[in-house]
Image: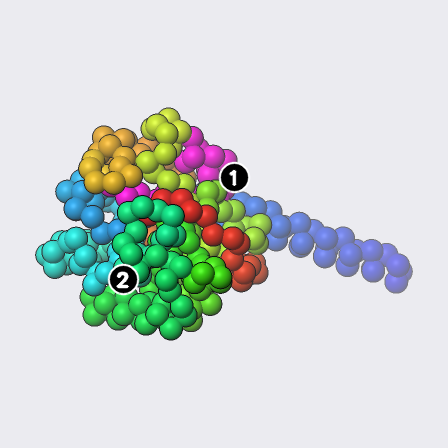
Amino acid sequence: MFFKSKLNCLLFLAASIAASTTTVAEEGYWPDGKTYCVTLTYDDGIPSQIAHALPQLKAAKMKGTFFCPGGVTYRWSQEDLDQIRDEGHELAGHTINHPCARKNDWVKPGNASEDYDDARMAKELDENLANLISNGVQSELATFAYPCGNTSIGEDKHSYVPLVKERFFAARGTQFGIEIPSQGDTDLFEVKTVAGHERDLAYQLDQVTNAREKQGWLVIMFHGVGGDHLAISADDHKEILRFLQNDDSVWVTTFQEAAAWVKSKPVATKTTAPAAADYGE
């Protein structure tokens, strides 16, 4: 009798665990039954983003994340900045002087990443964050992107990721890849990305399809849209948005919102950043 009762209890427990597992599998990792996530990011605060990216995002009813160096306005006017904020996009940090490795011939003397120490970088990050806050960004939710994906400073090339962690909610790097947060190996202070100007439209759409198949998080990094540097054509940018519009299984959201979702899930994430890539601006 005792054995039969114990067996029934074990069978009930197994059935409960199976039912719970099935529910998780059906619901998936992403909110509202979505299969995968895409985040559209725009670096450097450049005019073509206002001229082409903003109206296309508005028409597609999608929100993007704009990583801007300098005093936030940088190459934008205050009216441009107000439009970005008022249309619900995320405004995010990208330092003040955009320090990249000295080997890049366009880096101004004295503003190479090798010219920085912790004190100078900390001051610059504080100023960048203060500019964001003055334009409506909540300090505890501010996100960041490393210029050129370079996470090191000084002649000794030591990491400044700890300084970023002290000030920002999450950070995007430039290391190529699609994140799969459900596997528990996403570093929210070195989130991988795919450069939007790389190769052709077919390649970009393949990255979207790949993210869907992996049920992952694709962060696309744009610079120029229909102009400026590292540019994707306005038509190709529009086609990527159209492709996403026609896929009911995708969650298109800002970098901060996606990072917050990943952080909220009961899967531990890494806290150490890999070696920096020198990819993009």
Q: Is residue 193 above or below residue 120?
A: above
Q: Is residue 245 above or below residue 121?
A: above
Q: Position of residue 167 (x, y in %)?
A: 38, 70
Taking the view exactly as shown, the residue that stands out farthest to the front is: 109
SS for dot 2: loop
Residue topped by disc 2 = 96
Residue drawn at point x = 40 percent, y = 68 percent: 117
Task: Please indicate whether residue 14 sits to the left or right of residue 149 in the image.
Answer: right
Residue span colored magenta: 206-224
218 or 164: nearer the eye?
A: 164
Image quadrant occupied by the N terminus: bottom right
Residue drawn at point x = 41 percent, y = 36 percent: 208
224 or 101: nearer the eye?
A: 101
Residue type highlighted by circle 1: Lys
Q: Residues within 10 Å of mark 2 (few under 14, many from 20)?
A: many
Q: Position of residue 78 (x, y in %)?
A: 12, 59
Q: Is residue 241 above or below residue 131?
A: above
Do the numbered discs 2 and 1 sit on residues whose CB atoms are within 8 Å? no
N-term mark: 2 or 1:
2
Q: Is residue 278 above or below residue 128?
A: above
Residue drawn at point x = 38 percent, y = 52 percent: 101
Q: Residues within 10 Å of mark 1 (few under 14, many from 20)?
A: some
Quadrant of residue 234 within the rendered picture: top left
Task: Please indicate whether residue 4 sits to the left or right of residue 281 in the image.
Answer: right
SS for dot 1: helix
Q: Is residue 137 visible?
A: no
Mark identifier at residue 214: 1
Residue type highlighted by circle 2: Ile
Q: Position of residue 30 (x, y in %)?
A: 46, 49
Residue drawn at point x = 42 percent, y = 47 percent: 278
